Image (tube, grey):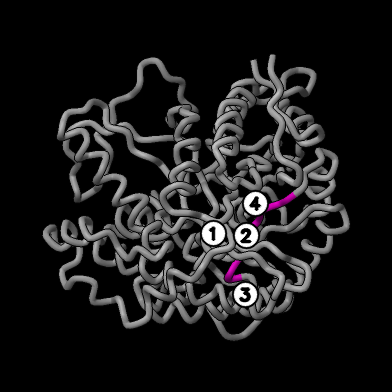
Amino acid sequence: MSILKFPENFIWGVATSAYQIEGAWNEDGRSPSHWDTFAHTPGKTRNGESGDVACDHYHRWPEDIALMASLGIQAYRFSVSWPRILPTGGSQVNQKGLDFYDKLVDGLLEKGIRPFITLYHWELPQTLQDLGGWPEREVVDHFVALADVVSRRLGDRVKDWITHNEPWCTSMLGHQIGQHAPGWQDWPAALKAAHHVLLSHGLAVPVIRANAPQAEVGIAPNYEPAYPLTRAPEDVEAARLWDGYFIRWFNDPLFGLHYPADMVALYETKKCLPHGLDFVQAGDMEAIAVPLDFIGVNNYTRQIMSGQISLNHVQTAASPNPNASYTEMDWEVYPNSLYDTLNRLHFHYHAPKIYVTENGCSYSDGPDGNGRIADQRRVDYFQGYLAGVHQAIGNGVPVAGYFIWSFMDNFEWARGYSQRFGIVYVDYQTQQRLPKDSAYWYKDVIKHNRLKTN
């Protein structure tokens, strides 16, 4: 056995999002979000399940904070519910909604837990969706208003801010593939949405910094690096296309490289951009490329690319790895996906600081007769990915912290409650929380700031 020590001041955290855990979907002045509308539409989610109650965190947050503290969690990444704070978008503040996050932040700080706030984790007020949603430029100003309201109220205590979670999911999964809210399949709308999400990030960053001068601000894209199955030209080309679609279209503008020219040309040829980049206005790209204090990395798996991809869907022509293990999301366990991403962000994009803002796996292990939840597969998953994080740090990659997804089992979007990512088990009937073996393993990792490997 070897011991991998992590740097002093390395941050060990857990992550959640508001819609997945809070519940209380129509309480205390919260208006519907487009995810409420989507989940309440028959056929959109598994068994018609929704986040109406979820983990009831809105009422049980003191219990959840106490549980985090008992596990030694050092930082908690959570999102705010936009329609809870600004029910109509960007004007009238719902004080009860803002008060909830005020109390949550104070409760975390009382326990010595560092709050990391994500402003947007896919909850657009339905009033803004009714105006056309993210494909409409008007939504950008509403998001900046949200950033202003929240950072004015909490910026005296919260020093770590993330503007958006996974812009690819907001734009492509929601507007081009249609598996997430609002459920569209519209290429031009998806690419407009992507631009407006990135622009809203760039315009919100200076607002947050003005309201919270000590703040560090970043964004948390998701990364699924593509690897060609073979060196055949069609496999290499498929991997390049996936990389442009999933990673470079978002990363390049954030780091001042504009939209990748090869993808612009392809999208124009395929009529995904029927009028070119006509939605890009003067100054937009400079705003998007505002210097970041850090970049977040959400990574779970990789894509193996084989043969041609249909641009209509940009679905992977996946060739499963017969020697690999897979989580219950059917995602390959491949630790090098995180290791390679961290290196790329440092050596190619020159990211100033990196947090692993999400990493985790879905396994449905439940309590045995003694109440123990032996989720060894989850522990093995974390061991592999964290070893890669440690190796990247040894390469000089400035990784400053690691956040497990997720703190507790929760509503997994279109898959409802069929997937369990938590290190804490949730009985959705009783709302009882039960730490899994992985939670106690993580407690030991945090306490000693090290990883034991075989």
Q: Which residues are magenta?
A: 75-83
Identify the disc placed on residue 21.
4
Residue with the most extreme left position = 269
- Report the Cα–Cα distance between label 4 and label 1: 12 Å
Image coordinates for residue 148, horizontal then vertical, percent? 62, 79
Q: Nearer the viewer, mark 4 or mark 1?
A: 1
Residue that mark 2 sits on: 79
Q: Earlier in the sequence, mark 4 or mark 3?
A: 4
Residue visible at 59% across and 75% down in the picture: 147
Image coordinates for residue 390, horizontal then vertical, percent? 61, 33
Residue visible at 39% across and 78% down in the picture: 131
Image coordinates for residue 319, horizontal then vertical, percent? 28, 26
Q: Earlier in the sequence, mark 1 or mark 2?
A: 2
Q: Nearer the viewer, mark 4 or mark 3?
A: 3
**76 in magenta:** yes
Residue that mark 3 sits on: 208
Residue that mark 1 sits on: 121
Q: Are marks 4 and 3 in contact (CB under 8 Å)?
A: no
| SS type, badge 3 | helix
The residue lying toward the viewer, choosing from 247 and 329, is 247
Q: Are marks 1 and 2 in contact (CB under 8 Å)?
A: yes
Residue neighbourhood size for the residue with mark 3, other residues' Cα within 10 Å, grouped as few (<14), some (14–19), many (≥20): many
Query: As drawn, is 408 to the left or to the right of 327?
Result: right
Q: Earlier in the sequence, mark 4 or mark 2?
A: 4
- Report the Cα–Cα distance between label 3 and label 1: 17 Å
> Type of residue at label 4?
Ile
Query: As drawn, is 402 to the left or to the right of 257?
Result: right
| Residue 433 to residue 54: above or below | above
| SS type, badge 1 | loop
Residue neighbourhood size for the residue with mark 4, other residues' Cα within 10 Å, grouped as few (<14), some (14–19), many (≥20): many
Q: Nearer the viewer, mark 4 or mark 2?
A: 2
